[in-house]
Image (cartoon, helix red, strand yellow):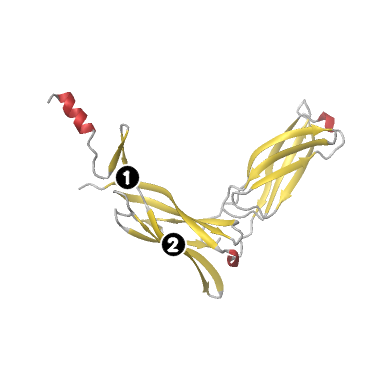
Amino acid sequence: MNKISVLLLVSLVILPGFIVTGCSLLPNTSLEILQYSLEKTVVEGELAAQITGVAHNDGSARLEYAEIIGDFYSQDDTLLATGFAKTISEGESFTLDPGEIWEFTISYSSLARDVHPSLNILNWDLEIDILGARIVGEAENNGDVVLSFAEITGTFYDAEEEELASGTVTTTGLGVGEIWQYTISYPAPNFEDVDQVKVEVTNTDYEPEPTQNVDHATVEVGALRGSTIMP
């Protein structure tokens, strides 16, 4: 067997804990959620909710980092909040060897996790007809909590980019992932001069949903980072 044949044979060998993808060797990272449940308890007179569950490293690589995403819903399936369980305990990270079990907890509490209220403007368009000028568009709650209040401001300009007027539109109770179809009307009579517009988010606010509004929850595996287990 010549040297070229030997090199080709070696390149096809799968090392322990790795799978071959093209010319790259990647750790075979995997995490299986075996079970989970939503629990409600009274702690010091206050109602608390949390997701508890069990996950299993069913891959061939040690997990240096793993996270599980938990979504909390109301009875009408409104997504109230999103939380995370991570392989970090008391500020220190821990690993999960192949076959190891992880008992995780995701708390529903604005004090126990970071919250990220956010509103993303997806699109907008200028419409002009005999009735006037208006901005129509869509915005999405791309944060992880229900927005109790959101405000969008539209500014109208003429062809020379001189500002003519501005208007605002607001909404309340915008659920996580929910799309808001908004309309901002031009607030003056000289709408024939409107040539272009600009739209921006000018205010957002949130109030943590009462724990009693939590009705059910779902979980899914988030980010994973693994390394090879050498024999």
* Picture residue at 37% right of the left edge, 51% below the top: 65
Look at the numbered disc 2 and give the secondary structure of its residue.
Answer: strand
Residue 104 seen by the camera: no
Which quadrant of the structure image shows residue 34? bottom left
Name the residue at the right extreme. 189
Q: What distance separates the C-alpha of mark 1 from that of mark 2? A: 24 Å
Which labelled disc corresponds to residue 65? none
Q: Is residue 30 shown above or below 35? A: above
Which quadrant of the structure image shows residue 3? top left
Front residue of 26 and 33: 33
Earlier residue among tags 1 and 2: 1
Q: Taking 168 as reference, is 33 left or right? A: left
* Picture residue at 56% right of the left edge, 59% below the top: 73
Look at the numbered disc 1 and give the secondary structure of its residue.
Answer: loop
Front residue of 51 and 119: 51
Q: Taking 132 as reference, is 82 left or right? A: left
Q: Which residue is mark 2?
A: 36
Q: Residues within 10 Å of mark 2 (few under 14, many from 20)?
A: some
Tell me the amino acid under the disc marked 1.
Answer: Asn
Q: Taking 191 as reference, is 181 left or right? A: left
* Residue 143 x/y as whole percent: 58, 50
* Picture residue at 28% right of the left edge, 42% below the top: 18
Name the residue at the left extreme. 1
* Residue 22 x/y as whole percent: 32, 32
Residue 28 seen by the camera: yes
Front residue of 181 and 195: 181
Q: How many numbered marks, from 0 up?
A: 2
Q: Taking 40 as reference, is 162 left or right? A: right
* Residue 39 x/y as whole percent: 49, 67
Q: Which residue is mark 1?
A: 28
Tell me the amino acid under the disc marked 2.
Answer: Tyr
